[in-house]
Image: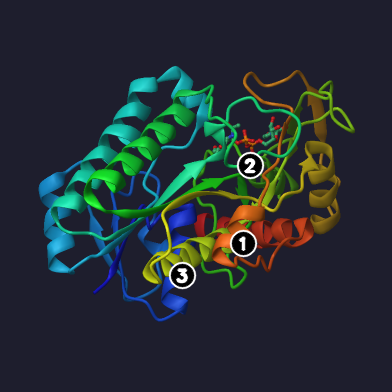
């Protein structure tokens, strides 16, 4: 019996694979390698190159490995791209997830862990959000994920599939042992861009907006270490194995840092006083998004071990240096 990880060669998926393998679980990865890398996987992991929209392929993998549990990461995640090309996102994230869920039910899969996003909440600037906040996504990306949440809940009600939906806040950092990290070359995420700037790979960093209603005028986000996030998935799986209820859980620490604070930490950790230019707001950025994280801590007994921005940035920096060595 193995766990199927879709998108397991990608950023968050590869950390999940490590978290499972470190705990002695057997893992099978399905990835179309559009943004993932086979070298992000530990040795000996079965990787089946293919697409989750291909039902026959999926069914053959599920049956071959007697899969009863799926952790579904494969997705497109760039918000502005989803605005420019919404059908790509509804096709890739929603329609292919429908195919995956349908195939999972047909093949008797029992447990399903789904990567959702804080983007389902929409523009909720202000107090930390909990899971009862009505979702009002403002991007096709957020809507493509919310529709998958709905499909899973309906499938659970009709067919008994058990699920945990994890709504990620701002995922950052890399495996503390340096085995994997964020490797997508055109990433737009703040911490990735900042460490690349510190390494001289970009001439400067743009700070998008300093006129928000926040403590220093820049946007505030809840940055969560990718290794703590992976642990949350393992805890979610174990919760369902013990017979726990299906549920939706925020994945954040419950505290926020501003863009300016992040830049200061990246300068401190890297020792590089790189240029950061104050530029106008980026369209679509809410001022503040911070998770209420009481529910996941209580329901899964989830205990983060890396809730430290300096540690998150250091791990991202170490990974970026390693990646530069690999690519250069
Ligand atoms: C967004 C999504 C999140 C999704 C993630 C995936 C929303 C509300 N959030 O996060 O759900 O998982 O994308 O891509 O849609 N910034 C700069 N300069 C930069 C880069 C970023 O100032 O060069 C600022 C942004 O304006 C923002 C903050 O840093 O205020 C974080 O940005 P980013 O890392 O891109 O993530 P989000 O947009 O918050």
Mark sitting earlier along the chain (2/1)? 2
The answer to whether marks 3 and 1 mark residues whose Cβ atoms lie closer than 8 Å is no
Q: CA distance from mark 3 to mark 1?
A: 24 Å
Q: Secondary structure at mark 3?
A: helix
Query: Where, quadrant-wise, is the N terminus in this rendering?
Result: bottom left
Q: CA distance from mark 2 to mark 1?
A: 13 Å
Q: Is residue 54 above or below residue 67?
A: above
For residue 18, the mark is 3
Q: Which residue lies under the disc numbered 2?
A: 130
Q: Is residue 65 left or right of residue 243?
A: left
Q: Is residue 321 left or right of residue 164?
A: right
Whether label 1 lies within 8 Å of ligand 1 gets the answer no
Mark sitting earlier along the chain (3/1)? 3
Q: Residue 219: name its quadrant.
A: top right
**Who's the residue at 78% across and 23% down the image?**
209
Circle 1 crowding by C-alpha within 10 Å: few under 14, some 14–19, many from 20: few
**Front disc: 3 or 1:** 1
Circle 2 crowding by C-alpha within 10 Å: few under 14, some 14–19, many from 20: some
Mark sitting earlier along the chain (3/2)? 3
Residue 200 place in picture, x, y as percent: 71, 45
**Who's the residue at 89% across and 33% down the image?**
215
Q: Secondary structure at mark 2?
A: loop
Circle 3 crowding by C-alpha within 10 Å: few under 14, some 14–19, many from 20: many
């Amino acid at each position: 019996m193995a766990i199927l990880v879709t998108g397991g060669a990608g950023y968050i998926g590869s950390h999940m694979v490590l978290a499972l393998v470190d705990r002695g679980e057997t893992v099978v990865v399905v990835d179309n390698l559009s943004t993932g890398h086979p070298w992000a996987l530990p040795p000996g992991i079965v990787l089946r190159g293919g697409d989750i929209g291909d039902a026959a392929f999926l069914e053959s993998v599920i049956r071959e490995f007697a899969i009863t549990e799926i952790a579904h990461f494969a997705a497109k995640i760039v918000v502005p791209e989803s605005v420019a090309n919404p059908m790509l996102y509804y096709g890739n994230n929603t329609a292919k997830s429908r195919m995956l869920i349908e195939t999972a039910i047909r093949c008797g899969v029992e447990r399903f862990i789904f990567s959702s996003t804080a983007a389902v909440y929409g523009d909720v600037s202000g107090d930390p959000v909990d899971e009862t906040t009505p979702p009002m996504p403002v991007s096709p990306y957020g809507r493509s994920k919310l529709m998958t949440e709905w499909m899973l809940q309906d499938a659970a009600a009709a067919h008994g599939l058990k699920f945990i939906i994890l709504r990620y806040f701002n995922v950052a950092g890399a495996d503390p042992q340096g085995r994997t990290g964020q490797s997508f070359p055109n990433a737009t995420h703040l911490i990735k861009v900042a460490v690349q700037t510190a390494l001289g790979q970009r001439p400067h960093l743009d700070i998008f907006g300093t006129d928000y209603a926040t403590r220093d005028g820049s946007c505030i986000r809840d940055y969560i270490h990718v290794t703590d996030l992976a642990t949350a998935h393992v805890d979610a799986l174990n919760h369902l194995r013990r017979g726990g209820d299906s549920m939706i859980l925020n994945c954040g620490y419950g505290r926020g840092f501003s863009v300016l604070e992040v830049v200061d930490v990246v300068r401190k950790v890297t020792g590089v006083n790189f240029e950061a230019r104050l530029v106008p707001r980026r369209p679509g950025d809410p001022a503040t998004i911070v998770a209420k994280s009481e529910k996941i801590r209580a329901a899964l007994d989830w205990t983060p071990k890396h809730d430290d921005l300096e540690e998150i940035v250091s791990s991202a920096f170490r990974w970026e240096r390693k990646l530069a060595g690999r690519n250069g």
